[in-house]
Each structure stands twice: as structure tokens, then as C-alpha cells.
Amino acid sequence: MFNNWNIAFWEYEFFAPYWLLLLLFIPFMWWYSINSDKKTPGNFKFSRTTSDQEALGDNNTKYLRWIVVSSYSFVACMLIFALARPFNQRLDDDLDYDLHSGIDIVMALDISSSMLARDFSPNRLEVAKKVAKQFVEGRKGDRIGLVVYEGEAFTACPATLDYSLLTSQIDQLQSGMLKPGTAIGVGLGTAVTRLRSDSLQSKVIILLTDGVSVHSEITPETAAQLAKAKGIKVYTIGVGSEGTAPYPEMTPFGVRYVDMPVEIDEVTLRNIAQITGGKYFRATDEASLRSIYKEIDLLEKRAFEALNVNHELPAMPLPFLSWALVIGIVAWSIQLLYFRTNG
């Protein structure tokens, strides 16, 4: 409801911005109207002295006249903004406007025990969850799903527009939920099956891991070929600092952390990206991981524009026209009733 009255013009973009040049004339219009109003003679005849006339006057009248004149300048501004055809995707509450113009995304997240390594603070998994949630919260109109994998994989959340449900599922992820291991092929293959044949024109998988793929019933390359056959682009992310990192190790006395070399199967991740037309990224800290998601977002926006989908966000002049109408009626009513002249 508030969106129908939102005139925060800095939040909008405009299909016809050249109309905004007319705003340069508004200050001159206001100045001319104020000065013309001051020089307008009254029609009320009064036979007594000037001091008696001033005593009968209302001290607030001149301010009220100033408000009326200024209101017409405000109305002119609103009409100019409406002519410029404003639009704002963030204020478009109609998520159902055209699902075929969105993107289907499945995030395949490695939750194996190595993701508890503490070269990220507090560990790789928590940072990966945090950045993934930020990515989800920044989307609009895209269906997003979640697949998690260790030695096996499962769908934590099917592709959905319910982002609050998805982020709650991300919050609940923990290492050790599945059979130990890092089955990249199984994780990718499961993500591919989550993108149905009736999916949107743009289909993307974001696969994140910090390890080396183990042998499983499907190899990463085979899963990548399946993705390619379905027109799915895969962006792969290798997570881990350079050199060594403190990895968790179970002992009879509990978990301890031991510095071990960081090993990421970058060759396989690059092959997956190359086969599917995606791109491989390496994240060595939280900041670089966040920037990777931003780059993926930018790459997909460019790819989406290249699809030449016949969908254009509607212009949103209604808030500006609504305010122009309301303020115009109020100003006109005051002028008619309070400042009416005698015939």
C-alpha cells in the first residue's frame, strides 16, 4: 500500500528522464507566483482607518496564501516526475509478473567436515552460509533452491520464491549431516535434477567446495555434461586460504585443530565451469567470497539482458499523480473557500 504513495524520487529510475529538465523552471514558477500574489489587489471595501483594518486581519493569512501558492509548484513537480515515467524494480510487489523473465538458481553447498577449517572466521561453513543468505536476500523474482552434499547429497530446499524459508534452511545446515566425504559429482548431479525441464530460460548452479572430489557413482565431469545438455550454467567456487589451514581432527579427547595443506580440486572445478559455460572462482577469505557472489550476480544480469526477453517493468507514475491530485484539490479548496472574492 505504501508503495502507491512513495514519491522518494531518488529510489526511482526513469524511462523518459528528459522531462526532468522541466524541474529547472519550478523555482522561477514559484517565485513568479509568490510575487504575483503579493501584487494582487483585494476586492473588499473598508471605510475605516488602516490600523483598524490590520486589527481585523488574520496574521496567519499570509502564510496560508504562501502554502497555497507553493502547493501548486509541488503539484507541477509531481506531474513532471509522472511524465518522466518512473520505475523501480524494488518497489514492484508483483513477484508473479512474468516468471519466464527470472532466473532459476540452485546452490550446491559442500558441508563436509573440512568446511569447519578455521582459516575463515569462525569457519568456512559459517561464512559460506552467511554469504549465501546475503545473496538470496538480494534477489527478486528468481527461484532459488539449495542442495547440500558430503559423501552423498540431498535437496535441502527446492527452487522457491519463498526466500525466508530458504534462508531458514541455510541457518540449519551443519557438517556431519550426511555420509563423510566430498562427492562433488553427486552434489552437482543432484542440483541438475532440481532444475526441471520446464524451468526458466536462464538456469544456474553455484557449486561451492573446499576439497578434492572422491569417487562416487557419478563423476563431476559426467554431471557437468548433464548440466550442459539441460542448458545449465555452473559457476564453481573453491573455498580455502593459500598454504595451510587449521583443520578439525577427532581425538579420544575431542576435536582438535591441526594445520594441514589446503587442497582444492581446482582442475575439476575449472573443467565443470568450462563444460557448462560458467566460470571458476577462488575464495581465500570472506571478503573475496562476497565479491564472487556479486560478480556472479553481475554476470547473470548481463546474460539475462542478452536473452532479449520481451518483458519491461511497468512505469510507476501513480504515486506522483496521487500526490498531485490530493495536494491540488486541497490547495484549490482552500483558495476557493478561504480566499474567495465577492462578485
Image: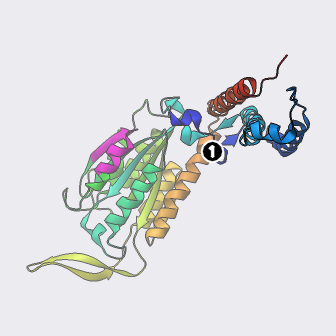
Q: Quadrant of residue 30?
A: top right
341 displayed left or right of 273: right
Q: Where residue 160 sits: x, y (%)?
A: 38, 38
Q: Is residue 23 magenta?
A: no
Residue 77 seen in this snapshot: no
Looking at the image, residue 56 sits to the left or right of residue 9; the answer is right
| 23 with respect to 129 (left or right) | right
Q: Amino acid at mark 1?
A: Ala
Foreground residue among 240 and 71: 71
Callout 1: SS: loop
Percent x, y of residue 322: 64, 29
Q: Which of 65 and 217 lies nearest the eye of the viewer?
A: 65
Q: Residue furthest top?
A: 343
Residue 26 x %, y %: 83, 42
As drawn, 129 above or below 195? below
Seen from the viewer's position, the closer of residues 231 and 133 is 133
Seen from this angle, which residue lies furthest left?
Answer: 252
Q: Which residue is mark 1?
A: 8
The picture places residue 161, in percent across and down from the top left corner, at 40, 38
Magenta segment range? 155-169
Q: Residue at x 24, y 53 (%)?
A: 152
The quadrant holding residue 308 is top right
Number of other residues with Cα within 10 Å of mark 1, as a class: few under 14, some 14 to 19, many 20 or more: few
Relative to residue 87, is residue 274 depicted above or below?
below
Image height of 238 relative to 245, above or below = above
- Residue 171 falls left or right of residue 289: left
From the viewer's side, name the closer residue of 276 and 303. Answer: 303
**Relative to 281, is 324 above or below?**
above
Q: Residue at x 42, y 60 (%)?
A: 131
Position of the C terminus by quadrant:
top right
Which colour assignment does the render follow? rainbow
- Whether residue 276 is visible: yes
